[in-house]
Amino acid sequence: MSKDHFDELLGKVGPLITKADTSMRLSIGPAERLAICLRYLATGDSYRTIAFSYRVGHAREVAGAIWTALVDETMPVPQTEDWRAIAAEFQERWNFPNWEHLS
């Protein structure tokens, strides 16, 4: 991932994953949290391995924040006409009906 892409993703996700410092500890910054999550997603290592490698606890909220930030632009919900086109393409490609006659 290029630095520009990382910075763009951080701009969208950063506000969702920023934690406040406490009197007991300093929080992990959003850039580091995002980098750790991307490493996990890219390598397929376990949460425990990644947490041990970076000396952090294993939290799963960054991946959810990525989904929340990107879902509307990367996976828009198809409209009725889109579903019809998808069904027609499926019928044409696989010669298999989509079972509309059953409903």
Image (cartoon, rainbow, N blue to C red):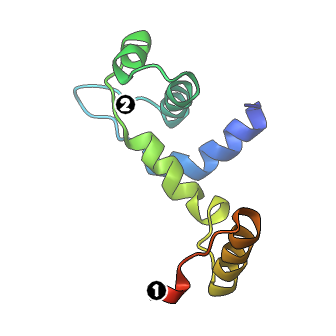
Q: Which mark is residue 102?
A: 1
Judged from the image, the secondary structure of the residue bearing numbered disc 2 is loop
The image shows residue 101, relative to residue 38, as above or below, that is below
Query: Of the residues under marks 2 and 1, which one precedes in the sequence?
Result: 2
Q: In the rendering, at what x and y percent does residue 27 appear? A: 37, 30
Q: How far, Cα to Cα, is label 2 from label 1?
A: 55 Å
Question: Residue at image x 46%, y 42%?
Answer: 63
Q: Residue furthest top?
A: 53
Near-viewer residue (20 or 32): 32
Q: Amino acid at mark 2?
A: Ser
Above or below for 23 versus 75: above
Asked if residue 73 shows in the view, the reply is: yes
Q: In the image, what residue type sits under mark 1? A: Leu
Identity of the residue drawn at 36% across and 12% down: 52
Residue pictured at 70% horizontal, 46% vertical: 8
Q: Residue furthest front?
A: 95
Quarter of the view holding residue 86: bottom right
Q: In front here: 40 or 91?
A: 91
The disc at residue 57 is: none
Q: Position of residue 60 (x, y in %)?
A: 37, 38
The residue that disc 2 covers is 27
Q: Is disc 1 surrounded by few (<14), some (14 to 19) or many (20+) residues within 10 Å?
A: few
Q: Count the marks: how many?
A: 2
- Say which element carries label 1: helix
